[in-house]
Image (spheres, helix red, strand yellow):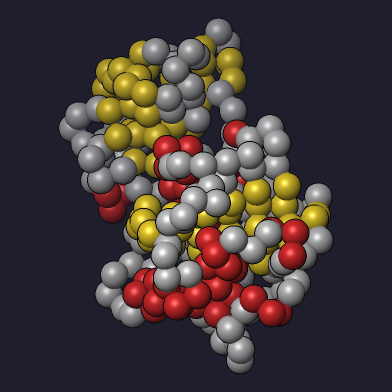
Amino acid sequence: MAHQPIVTLTTDFGWNDHYVGTVKGVILSIAPNATIVDISHAVQSFDILDGALMIAQAYSYFPAGTIHLVVVDPGVGTTRRPIIASTDRHHFVAPDNGVLSLVYSREERLHVRHVTSEHYSLQPMSSTFHARDLFGPIAAYLAKGVDSEKFGEEITDFTRFNAPKPKTVEGKLKGVVLKVDRFGNVITNCVRRTCRRFLVRIPYRSRSMLASARSQACIRFTPRVKREKYSPSWAAWDIWS
């Protein structure tokens, strides 16, 4: 672990309340040398897919030893498990609800632990603010150098969803638009080697536009899709070659 460990935050908390600042305060109280980086607090509320996309696009660009705190938690207060997922380079602290699914699909070597030790949580624990009382402290103790094995036993039945893959239909490549960001970038499930140029069909405009692949799983097109038209559904829009 680096002398000044990095803890990233990815949440659906927004900036209008005290939640983000409070979680940072808890982390710094336990690990005062930690550097905290905000990946995003604008994940769509309770949208696990949006959170999964957000962390999957960012985590690999951080140094080895980084702890990623990911809290998009519609099941807070229920029996869903708190987990630590560890790869060769990073730790992820999150609820076991599938929000790390795209990380799982990208990492070959992975260990997931169910956090059962109450020693590393704040007491009494709120039933609605586990980011402060549970996930934040876990991330902080990892940043402080506590070994992940001390938090709980390894599990193999962690929750994950399978992202849809592009498929060939009648000789045409068919994929799915997963998200449209605020700059008009369309995030798809197509990778560069299989996705070069597409006709993007947008139902509410009832017309097609030519778009070029700019990066892995990302297309940019104009005019931009209005953000309020964004849908988190897997089947929001289709892409045809």
Say whether residue 108 is left or right of residue 74: right
Report the residue at 36% width, 13% height from top: 197
Q: Which quarter of the image is occupied by the C terminus?
A: top left
Q: Quadrant of residue 155?
A: bottom right
Q: Residue drawn 53% across and 47% down? A: 65
- Which residue of the protein is positioned furthest toward the bottom in this rendering? 124
In the rendered image, residue 202, in percent from the top left (x then y), is placed at 33, 33
Q: Residue at x 43, y 47 (%)?
A: 54
Q: Position of residue 40 (x, y in %)?
A: 36, 56
Q: Residue 63, position in %: x, y?
A: 45, 42
Above-or-below relation of 117 to 159: below
Instruction: Give the image location of residue 228, x and y in percent.
Output: 28, 53
Up/down of 75 relative to 106, above or below: below
Q: Is residue 239 visible?
A: no
Q: Is residue 218 left or right of residue 70?
A: left
> Which residue is at the front of the view, 59 or 140?
140
**Would residue 94 appear left or right of 36 to someone viewing this image?**
right
**Image quadrant of residue 14?**
bottom left
Instruction: Quadrant for residue 119, please give it.
Output: bottom right
For the residue pair 103 and 141, the one nearer the viewer reads as: 141
Q: In the image, is 160 to the left or to the right of 206?
A: right
